[in-house]
Amino acid sequence: MHTDLSNKPNRWAMLSAVFYRLLARVLPHAKPTVEQARRSRKQLHDFASGGLALFWQRQGIYAGAAVLCGAYFSVPIAALCYLFCQLTDIFDSSVSLKVVNRKDNSLRHTRHLFKMLFLSNTLSSLSVATFTLLVANLEGPANHFTSLFFLFAAGLFAAVNNHQLPQVLTVRLVIYGTLFIYIPASDIWAENPPYTSKMWMHFATALFVLYFVLECSMIFLRLYQRGLDQLEELRTERDKARASNEMKSQFVSVVSHELRTPLTSITGALTLLRDADLSENPQSAARMLDIAHKNSNRLSKLINDLLDIQKMEADKMSYDFAPLVLQDLIQDAAQSIAPFADKFNVQIVVQNTEEPLCVQADYERMMQVLDNLLSNAVKFSDPETRVEISASRIGDAAILEVRDYGIGIPADAHDLVFGKFTQVDNSDRRSFEGTGLGLSIVQQIIHDHAAEIDFQSTLGVGTRFFATFPDILDPPD
């Protein structure tokens, strides 16, 4: 006797372990994304708010079932089952209230609330199943209209109202479905009737009705999931519209600033040239012309960048692809950028391999790429440092690289590097001129060459941009 008593706590522990293993299987193990976590919170909220809205309907159903059971079968059983259903329903409603009124939106709290809802709905399902099973026993064999109809109503109610949480819907349908088959099957097992008996017809009808309930469950579940998908699509489109409006605001701000500055300088220089006596101060006239010329070039570059972005967005950028030796390309790019680098007292160093590396590319567009990369490297380098440009081979790929030893890019700004109308600038440095379109254009041109571009940077040490061309051609004769 002592041994039996000592085993009871172990049995309860085993039952608890089984329940929480079931929950572990139901709950996902991987950390969800932000969208998945938001979707889970909405599903919990929809399930809980829907359950609270149906509270009085459930009360009417329980009361009606108890009255029928008490009037035609047994008052004590009706009263006991009604009390059991009420207790589980009150527990379920209290959990639903916690979900609806939650303040903590953390993943841990969401998981806890889900466990509580899963537990409360499992107990609620078991109370309905117990009530139905007792009614079936009171009805006697081959006469289960009331009990099976109760189960049918419970299953249909779950299909219509519990589709927000597939896990809860599944446990309800498993409990109801198992009992739906067990009641007519137990009659056949006990009575062993011939195949012409109505017991077999009841069993077949139960299977048919169960299929109908399951199909209804899937329909409502798919409709709800489709609604969630559409809601996510609308939210995504809303976020895109917000991002587009933000980019539009940035565009207006950047372009207006970049246009105003050179136009003001050009206008001022031309006004001075018009009003001044050039013969008396030729040096001042030359300086004014130089200012107007520089700002005209700056204005021209801005307009060209805007035109390139528009062509890329419209997928109308034209290319003249031909075999191109990268060593020749970087020599031309280094010579082109040298006067600009001299103004910053930065040296351009070309590092070439002896093996000629040839790729299919557009010479003018690749010069545009290197001009952007080299000018950025020069601007963000300290005086009396160097910028290296090289072409090398790694395996079957050609690597085109620009490396500087300047201020570097902060780690929290890496996502901005290839963005439109964005500039990455250190807080203790002045803001450099530019629209923030250059690297975005560079990335698109490289991608249009079936290549990839990336960068590595250490703050205060320097930055390395490198483009990888996967297909190396035989060099032309």
Image (spheres, rainbow, N blue to C red):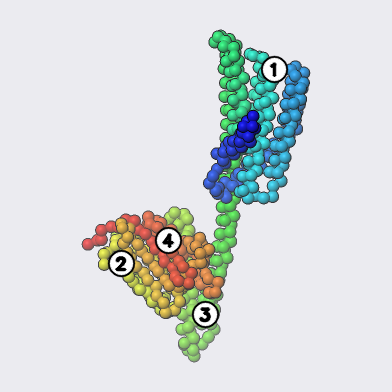
Query: Toward the viewer: 260 or 13?
Result: 13
Number of the label disc, if any, that sits on residue 138: 1
Q: Which residue is mark 3?
A: 269
Q: CA distance from mark 2 to mark 1?
A: 94 Å
Number of the label disc, if any, that sits on residue 454: 4
Q: Residues within 10 Å of mark 4 (few under 14, many from 20)?
A: few
Q: Quadrant of residue 84?
A: top right
For the residues labelled 3 and 1, say whether their Cβ atoms are less than 8 Å apart.
no
> For numbered disc 2, what is the local secondary structure?
helix
The answer to whether residue 200 is above or below residue 451 is above
> Which amino acid type corresponds to the residue marked 4 in the rendered image?
Asp
**Label located before the other in sequence (2 or 1):** 1
Q: Residues within 10 Å of mark 1 (few under 14, many from 20)?
A: some
Q: Which residue is mark 2?
A: 327
> Which amino acid type corresponds to the residue marked 2 in the rendered image?
Gln
**Label located before the other in sequence (3 or 1):** 1
Q: CA distance from mark 3 to mark 1?
A: 105 Å
Residue lying at 48% horizontally and 61% vertically, measured from the top left: 418
> For numbered disc 3, what is the local secondary structure?
helix
> Which amino acid type corresponds to the residue marked 1 in the rendered image?
Leu
Could you tell me which quadrant the N terminus lies in?
Answer: top right
Could you tell me which quadrant the C terminus lies in?
Answer: bottom left
**Label located before the other in sequence (3 or 4):** 3
Q: Nearer the viewer, mark 3 or mark 4?
A: 4
